[in-house]
Image (cartoon, rainbow, N blue to C red):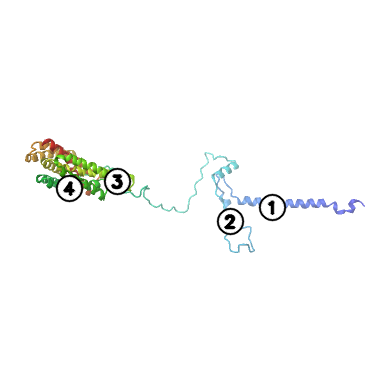
Amino acid sequence: MSDDQQYPQQQHYPQQYSQQQYAQQQQYAQRQQYAQQQYEQQQPQYDQYGQPYAQQAQAYDDAPETQQWQGQTWDTQVQPPVQPYLPPQQPQQQAQQQEWAGYGAASPASPAPAAPASSAEPEPEPEYGPPTVTGNTRVTDAQRARAEGRSPVIEPGIQPAALTAALGVLLAGGALVGSYGLLVPLLLLQAVTAAGWFRLNGMWPARQGIALAFLGGVVADIALLAAGREHGPAAILGTLGVWVLLTLVLQLRSHASPDERMYGLMATVTSAALAVIATGWLAAEPDAVTVGAVAVAVVIVARALPLPTPASVVVALLAAAGAGVAAGGVTDLGAGGALLGLGAGVCALIGHRVASYDYPSRFVHMTAGVALPLAAASPAVYLLGRALI
């Protein structure tokens, strides 16, 4: 018996094994092809601009679910239907897909893709003010005046001029009485000067600074009365030096910011200096005080008249010289009163101009506008009175 007859199935076993293996390979290839088709159908297709085809996306959305679980899964609750996920297209992805598709860079003739119109109405934006670094800062009257092309300078009216004239008359009358009769209106002048300067610089209330400046004027008055009129410059300058040093020490002990301390230092020193310099009325000769005070009263009233500025200044200076001549005729100055009245009038107009600067308020006019013309005229009254008498 041959080997083939002894083992009849041995001849067909390799053939049957090859057919079974081939069938398995065919089934595996079909499954791979089916899975690839399903994966490609789930991937979004893109046109030449990198945008997904709306038809395919809509068809994918409308396609029925291919698998439905009839049995109980691990999550026994009802699950919402799964929506198809379309990944957002990145610019780099778009460029790569365009290159894969053979388009490369977009041609110049190709229209740019239009932005999808939003169906929802845009919400109105809230109305905010301009951004600020330091809060809602108010525009000052001076800034508004400059923006509108107007002058930021407003001169004091007739009421401050009348108060200046009244205070000048009090000084002239006090000089005729004596040094202590002159001291009462002088203290009032020094107090209004200290308060008006701080208010003119926008620092209000500044009680400590006002009190310190006014106290400097009082100390200068006391030192001058104690030393005598002949030592008036030494008493005034000595008090001024001590008060500058005292103000500097007090500002260094302040806990404010460096800018605020510097600003407060300059305002306090200037206010104290004006209050101390006003003591010059007490150091001047009584006849010079009378002529100078009358001249200041007349020049400020003339300056408040409703005239153009150049004409008003000329009229005011002529009125000051005339008032000096008239008052000099009553005193021992005589015709020299015209020069003293003219010098006092020029200094008074300078003080008047300073009180009008930067669109001041009515309170500034009623304090600095009243006191600064008289305080600024005191050096001229002292120097010209010593020279003419």
Question: Which label was assigned to residue 251?
Answer: 3
Q: Is residue 73 left or right of residue 325?
A: right
Q: Residues within 10 Å of mark 1 (few under 14, many from 20)?
A: few
Work out whether residue 254 or residue 107 is closer to the camera in this orientation and state it. 254
Mark 4 or mark 1, which has the lower sequence index? Answer: 1
Secondary element at tag 2 = helix
Find the distance from the CA under tag 2 to the CA under tag 1: 25 Å
- Mark nearest the camera among 1 and 3 is 3
Q: Amino acid at mark 2?
A: Asp
Q: Residue furthest front?
A: 227
Q: Amino acid at mark 4?
A: Leu
Find the distance from the CA under tag 4 to the CA under tag 1: 112 Å
Find the distance from the CA under tag 1 to the CA under tag 3: 91 Å
Q: Is residue 65 left or right of residue 370?
A: right
Residue at which label 2 appears: 62
Q: Amino acid at mark 3?
A: Gln
Question: Which label was assigned to residue 187?
Answer: 4
Secondary element at tag 3 = helix
Q: Is residue 233 visible?
A: yes
